Image (tube, grey):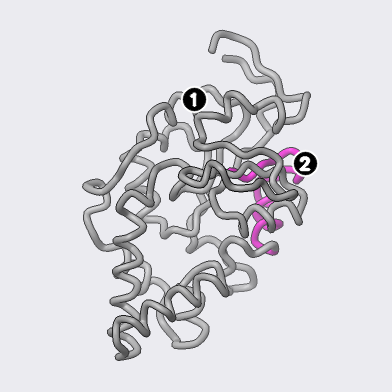
Amino acid sequence: MTQRHPRFVWFFDLDDTLHDASHAIIGRIDQRMTEFVMRHLRIERAAADRLRRDYWHRYGATLLGMVRHHAVDARHFLRDTHDFDILALLRRHPGVVSLLRWLPGRKVLLTNAPAAYAHTVTVGLGVHRHLDRGYAIESMRIHGHLRPKPARSMLRAMLKRESVRPASAALVDDNLANLRAARAVGLRTIWVTGRRASARKPAYVDVRVRNVRELRQVFGRVAPRAVRFTGTQ
């Protein structure tokens, strides 16, 4: 397959986008985060679970709340909360590898997950060979401070780092807050709804798909006309 305009960039989220994390992995991560909060703050499970959820809603990541309000070491938090048998819980979306192989343009992973976890998952899925680059939460820093999705400052920094104009890039993500921020900085937006297939599409979402395999069907509505390729599919 010969690509004429490979500079169009697809930023892909990981969990519940490239694989079905809600099947088992998200629940395990949530459990370990709650247990971390319990130990660190010496509070009961119910209170720890409420605080975990509150920080996730307020900051986009429980980690940020723990760092900002409780002086938690980010590396320790990420290592502890993702220390389990990831591959045993991994549920693949059939056809994702062939979709990434087919999709014209550059593919970049942009995930709020830690790097070690992202590496294990992408290799386990077999998609690592088709990702040109990957950014995990450790690399999402602005002036030394963690700024994961949906931070607009981080998204602008990633566009600059990838040397791509916003109109020539798209974010593929299951999280609406992330997509809202992406649209605000000028990216095209693709919402992976998964089990929420009947949910209403917000105005800041360009295209709604049930899973990433449907990008084949909506490609022409997302990528600019200049992006074309030749050869067999």
Q: Secondary structure at mark 2?
A: helix
Mark 1 sits on what residue? 101
In the image as oriented, which residue stretches furthest toward the bottom?
A: 42
Residue 35 lies in quadrant:
bottom left
**Mark 1 is on which residue type?**
Arg
Q: Residue furthest front?
A: 198
Instruction: Give the residue displayed 66% in from the left and 46% down from the top.
Output: 201
Spot occupied by residue 165 in the image (x, y as percentages of width and height): 76, 44
Magenta residues span: 153-172
Task: Out of 137 and 98, give the one closest to the viewer.
Answer: 98
As drawn, is 42 to the left or to the right of 56?
left
SS category of the residue bearing label 1: helix
Q: Which residue is mark 2?
A: 167
214 is higher (above) or lower (below) than 88: above
Identity, as a three-letter code, of the amino acid under mark 2? Ala
Between 143 and 128, the one lying in front of the other is 128
Rendered residue at 43%/81% (across/down): 51
Badge number at residue 50: none
The structure residue drawn at horizontal position 30% and vertical position 83%, both measured from the top left corner, is 38
